Amino acid sequence: MNILEIRDFSFSYPDQEKRALTEISLDIKEGTLNVICGRSGCGKSTLLRQMKSVLAPHGEKKGMILYKGKPLAELEYRTQSKEIGFVMQNPDNQIVTDKVWHELAFGLESLGYDNATIRLRVAEMASYFGIHRWFYREVKELSGGQKQLLNLAAIMAMHPSLLILDEPTSQLDPIAASDFLETVKKINRDIGTTVIITEHRLQDIIPFADKVFVMDQGKLITEGTPGEIGLELKRREHGMFLSMPVPMQIFASVDSDLACPLTVSDGRMWMQ
Ligand SMILES: Nc1ncnc2c1ncn2[C@@H]1O[C@H](COP(=O)(O)OP(=O)(O)OP(=O)(O)O)[C@@H](O)[C@H]1O
Ligand SMILES: [Mg+2]
């Protein structure tokens, strides 16, 4: 089943002649890990923000966005808050309380959950994300990586069905970034949460994606498994090909009859 369906969706920012998004149509299957990529300014953030009404920028829209078969615009903000989690680049813009434990509870408190449920969910998340070691700390004492992990855990405490992440590691050092992306993959694998992510560290996430969407100047130019995307970008001689993970470039470049350093299984790529 599709959790999200976007149909012929176009969007222009106010007073801008050029559209930021042009006739985008895509389906996101429940439980899958999806990567949206493309050069800076191609419209990735603009598209992701349309997937949660409270974050959608003002402007002229055409087309439809359906969440679980219903127009997203008709879904109450409360339901969207609970079911659609959104992680932005900078955790400082999302964290609202000063204590770690309180941040984990805050979203649930706002949604009116009872104390027993809040306690259970907070304990669950602290344990799952390894936060119990710094559970009673002040947020300001945390590293960037810990803050982004806390941000993610606070969102996951609401048990969202869809987790959207817009360049979540751009403020993190390479090790923290890699750890964070491991956690995102684990959430998708263990809990089955549908993930849509834009990420500049494509080598850490694309090989694990069920589906990759490539955007260029506000349009969706191709979509498919990582293996298919590599071959398609290579065929088109598109500039994004060189931004793809190196193994994917090798895979797309070698003659398929030759001994290949990669295998593709279930649409995912693995080093032999
Ligand atoms: N608030 C805004 N008002 C007008 N134009 C905007 C606004 N925000 C973004 N744009 C324009 O819309 C286009 C898409 O921007 P967007 O931020 O979605 O790109 P992006 O793919 O997320 O880029 P990046 O990889 O740098 O994050 C760009 O041309 C950008 O200049
Ligand atoms: Mg962006």
Image (cartoon, helix red, strand yellow):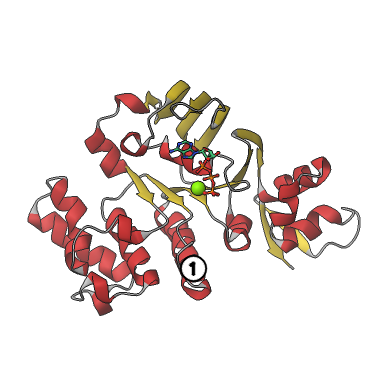
- Residue 142: where, in percent of width, then height? 30, 74
In the displayed structure image, the side of residue 111 where residue 167 appears, left or right: right
Q: Is residue 200 visible?
A: yes
Q: In this orientation, which residue lies closer to the viewer: 237 or 181?
A: 237
Residue 267 position in % (x across, y down): 66, 49
Q: Relative to 68, is 205 on the left or the right?
A: right
Q: How many marks?
A: 1
In the image: residue 75, left or right of residue 69: left
Q: Looking at the image, which residue sits at the far front?
A: 15
Most extreme residue toward the left, as rendered?
A: 115
| Whole-percent x, y for residue 170 in the image | 49, 61
Q: Secondary structure at mark 1?
A: helix
Left/right of residue 138 with respect to residue 155 in the rendered view: left
Between residue 144 and residue 190, name the one nearer to us. Answer: 144
Residue ID for mark 1: 177
Is the residue 101 above or below the residue 13 in the image? below
Report the residue at 63% width, 47% height from top. 39
* Occupied quadrant, residue 69: top left
Percent x, y for residue 149?
Answer: 36, 65
- Identity of the amino acid at label 1? Ala
Q: Residue at x 42, y 39 (%)?
A: 49
Q: Residue at x 63, y 36 (%)?
A: 217
Residue at 66% over, 46% down: 225
Instruction: State the quadrant of the C terminus.
Output: bottom right
